[in-house]
Image (spheres, grey):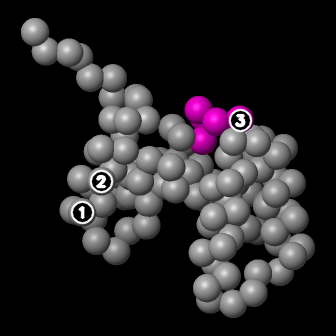
Amino acid sequence: MFRKRDKTSLEYRRKRGRRLAWASPGYSTCGRCGTPWNHTQRHSTEYSETEGCFPLCEACWSELTPEQRLPYYVKMIFGWEQYGPVEQEKVAAIREAVLAGK
């Protein structure tokens, strides 16, 4: 007998994400499961009235606590820093929004 796949599991989404990333050149991906943004719903974290960011898809975001989400936002900010320094006020605003569960 075949085992029924749990399509919501992180393991399944990671395998699927690797396949879809190969087939979706030019798209960035969820920082946890690796699914390209053109194949999943992103969770936008609004950290000001006019700005937001999305290092996690909605599925991954909803499985984690605010404290567990924070490292994915830190990794995203480190990625931004390759293009120049990131304002500390922005970093603080993102951290505050993440820990507030936004």
Q: Amino acid at mark 1?
A: Trp
Q: Is residue 71 above or below residue 74?
A: above
**To which residue does mark 2 refer?**
18
| Nearer-N-terminus badge (3/1) | 1
Residue 99 visible in the snapshot: yes
Numbered disc 2: secondary structure = helix
**Would residue 14 be found to the left or right of residue 82 on screen?**
left
Q: Is residue 50 above or below residue 36?
A: below
- Residue at image position (30%, 53%) is 18
Q: Is residue 35 above or below residue 77?
A: above
Q: Amino acid at mark 2?
A: Arg
Tell me whether circle 3 and circle 1 mark residues in contact (CB < 8 Å). Answer: no
Outermost residue to the top? 1
Residue 24 colored magenta?
A: no
Magenta stretch: dominant SS?
helix
Q: Which residues are magenta?
A: 61-65
**To which residue does mark 3 refer?**
65
Q: Which mark is residue 22?
A: 1
- Residue at image position (10%, 9%) is 1
x and y, in percent, of residue 33 in the image: 44, 47
**Would residue 75 be found to the left or right of residue 97 on screen?**
left
Depth check, front residue: 69 or 28: 69
Residue 42 visible in the snapshot: no
| Nearer-N-terminus badge (3/2) | 2
Tell me whether circle 2 and circle 1 mark residues in contact (CB < 8 Å). Answer: yes
Q: Which mark is residue 66?
A: none
